[in-house]
Amino acid sequence: ETLQRIVEEIVSRLHRRAQRPATLSVTQLRDADGAALFCQHASLRILLVDLPLLGQLADAETDDAAARNIHDALAFGIRVPLSLHRRLPVSYAQ
């Protein structure tokens, strides 16, 4: 009976986690405790990602706390959709 209650509690927490995506700005992500976020949310939506952060993600750099948290989230299997900043410069390769 105790084991059954433990299993039910775990299933309940996992279900709540799956139903609660987090939406954060880049600044909030930099200040966030990654481990706590990953335990509570199955998806992290990051708003207004800028070009420097995209470059760090593409180059697998983890100097910036936001980039490090995104890389860690992906390593944990967490979905991380990114919303790009409207004024992100666009360049075309020729």
Image: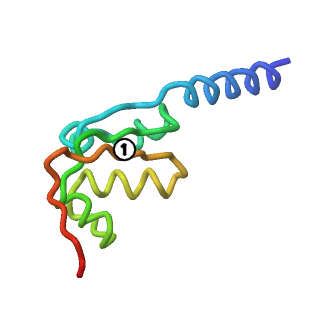
Residue farthest toward the front in the current orientation of the protein: 94
How many numbered markers are drawn? 1
| Left or right: 41, with 1 as reference point | left
Between residue 45 and residue 70, name the one nearer to us: 45
The spot of residue 56 in percent (x, y) is 25, 65
Residue drawn at x 48%, y 38% is 43
Place residue 92 in its image quadrant: bottom left
The amino acid on which the numbered mark 1 sits, given as a three-letter code, is Gly
Q: In this view, does 52 lie above or below 37?
A: below
Quadrant where the C terminus is found in the figure: bottom left
Residue drawn at x 22%, y 42% is 48
Quadrant where the N terminus is found in the figure: top right
Place residue 36 in its image quadrant: top left
The spot of residue 16 in percent (x, y) is 58, 23
Q: How is the image coloured?
A: rainbow
Between residue 32 and residue 83, name the one nearer to us: 83
> Dot 1, how many residues are within 10 Å of its Cα: few (below 14), some (14-19), or many (20+)?
some
Residue farthest toward the right in the current orientation of the protein: 1
Place residue 93 in its image quadrant: bottom left
Q: Is mark 1 on a helix, strand or loop?
A: helix
Q: Is residue 34 above or below residue 61?
A: above
Between residue 33 and residue 54, name the one nearer to us: 54
| Left or right: 66, with 78 as reference point | left
| Left or right: 22, with 52 as reference point | right
Between residue 80 and residue 73, name the one nearer to us: 80
The spot of residue 46 in percent (x, y) is 32, 41
The spot of residue 7 in percent (x, y) is 76, 27
Q: In this view, does 40 lie above or below 70?
A: above
**Residue at the spot of label 1:** 34
| Left or right: 1, with 54 as reference point | right
